[in-house]
Image (tube, rainbow, N blue to C red):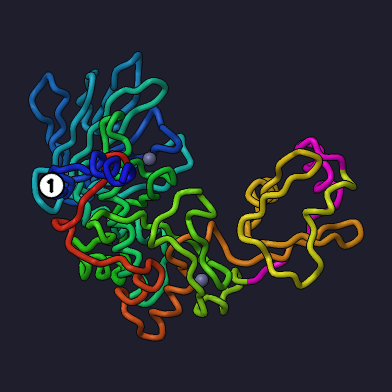
Amino acid sequence: MMTRVFITILIALFPLTAYGELSIRIFARTKPVTVVFTPDNGVYLLSDGQHGDVRILPGETVAVTRHAGRVIYMTLSGISGVADSLTFTPAGSSSVFRLRAPARNEAVKTLDGLLKIKSFPGSLQIINVTSVESYLPGVVRAEAGKYGPPDYFKAQAVVARTYVYRNAGRHELDGYNLCDDTHCQVYLGLISELPIIEACRATAGKVLIDRDSMLIVPAFHGNCGGVTASSADVWLAGYPYLVSVNDPWCGYSASSVWKKSLPMNDWNSFLRTKGIKPGEEAVLYSPPGSKPVRVMNRTVQGKSITSEEIRLRFDLRSAYFTLTPAGDSLTVSGRGYGHGVGLCQDGAKAMAEKRVTYDKIITFYYPGISITDIKNARRPVRP
Ligand SMILES: [Zn+2]
Ligand SMILES: [Zn+2]
């Protein structure tokens, strides 16, 4: 009863269609101090908030740099100025531009919609205002890869769209919806792969909801190793649709069953950093061929040690493994790739190849959920 009351308080009552527009912080990971803007297609109007708009033609460049808490801009034709913030507005509906960060290791991004740039402590804050549907293909391409059958991409598109609407308030205090890095969802900008664009278009507006019409937590991972994990085990937060499911589909992949050998010296120094004396850790080991435990949490000499800590330290594909000493090395026998919760990408791809449709793929991995239009969904105030 208490939980129910609590959940009701957290439900937003305003319509979600307000989020058809989406603002994304671009280059959020490398935070450049200089960027170069170039219209690719169509004319852009540059406004510095003080003078009249400057028309920027296709192929023309505008360099923008942070200086003393403000932004300096200079066009190729020699127009320059200093401002608190800049706005690049498309003059036509098909306007597209490219954005580069010359001093940063970032790929050029092709974007549409509006661009706002202002000075931020230590960097520029670059915000792209676009639409959810125009943003999605560049996320699906980053999260699902380049190759796959149409229903695999459709499943990923609905998952990514659900994530966007559920988490649109994530950077509310920063003044935008989502960042373009792994913290939210990696956004590559506009892409050219037609199968992905088509999969997003074919599922436009569709999202995943639970029995209370609430947008779900659309967790996914690379490969589950034959059985998906329940979120209650991995994250200590249970959802009725993030439960363990036996997956007969993903065994074909090299990520399904794997082995790695760790030098015993490295392992011993790891144990010491955990305050454990090497030689006393037998409780962590299993005989060869044992079934792995999804989330191992053991106590050795009064110190707790988890499979997730071991995964992070040794860069393992998952935290689903057994450890077996083998002379001067330690054999890690593992399954799967990623956290194992929700949709298994390798399994989803195999199902789609066997002509299972995206709605069946989704309900296989998230039991009990429904696919609906965003206008029928509710969003928690705090994701
Ligand atoms: Zn973020
Ligand atoms: Zn799987």
> Image quarter for residue 354?
bottom left
Q: What range is drawn magenta here?
A: 257-277
Q: Looking at the picture, how far across and down is residue 374, in whole percent?
A: 18, 57
Q: Is residue 317 visible?
A: no
Q: Is residue 114 above or below residue 17?
A: above
> Image quarter for residue 184?
top left
Viewer-closest of 23 and 247? 247
Viewer-closest of 108 and 123? 123
Picture residue at 40% right of the left edge, 50% below the top: 186
Q: Badge 1 is on which residue?
A: 15
Q: Looking at the picture, how far across and down is residue 303, in whole percent?
A: 75, 39
Q: Looking at the picture, how far across and down is residue 200, in whole percent?
A: 25, 65
Looking at the rendered structure, the kind of residue marked 1 is: Pro
Q: Is residue 13 visible?
A: yes
Viewer-closest of 112 and 349? 349
Picture residue at 87% right of the left edge, 44% below the top: 278
Picture residue at 19% right of the left edge, 42% below the top: 12
> Is 229 placed left or right of 84 in the picture?
right
Q: Quadrant of the C terminus?
A: top left
Helix, strand or loop status at disc 1:
loop
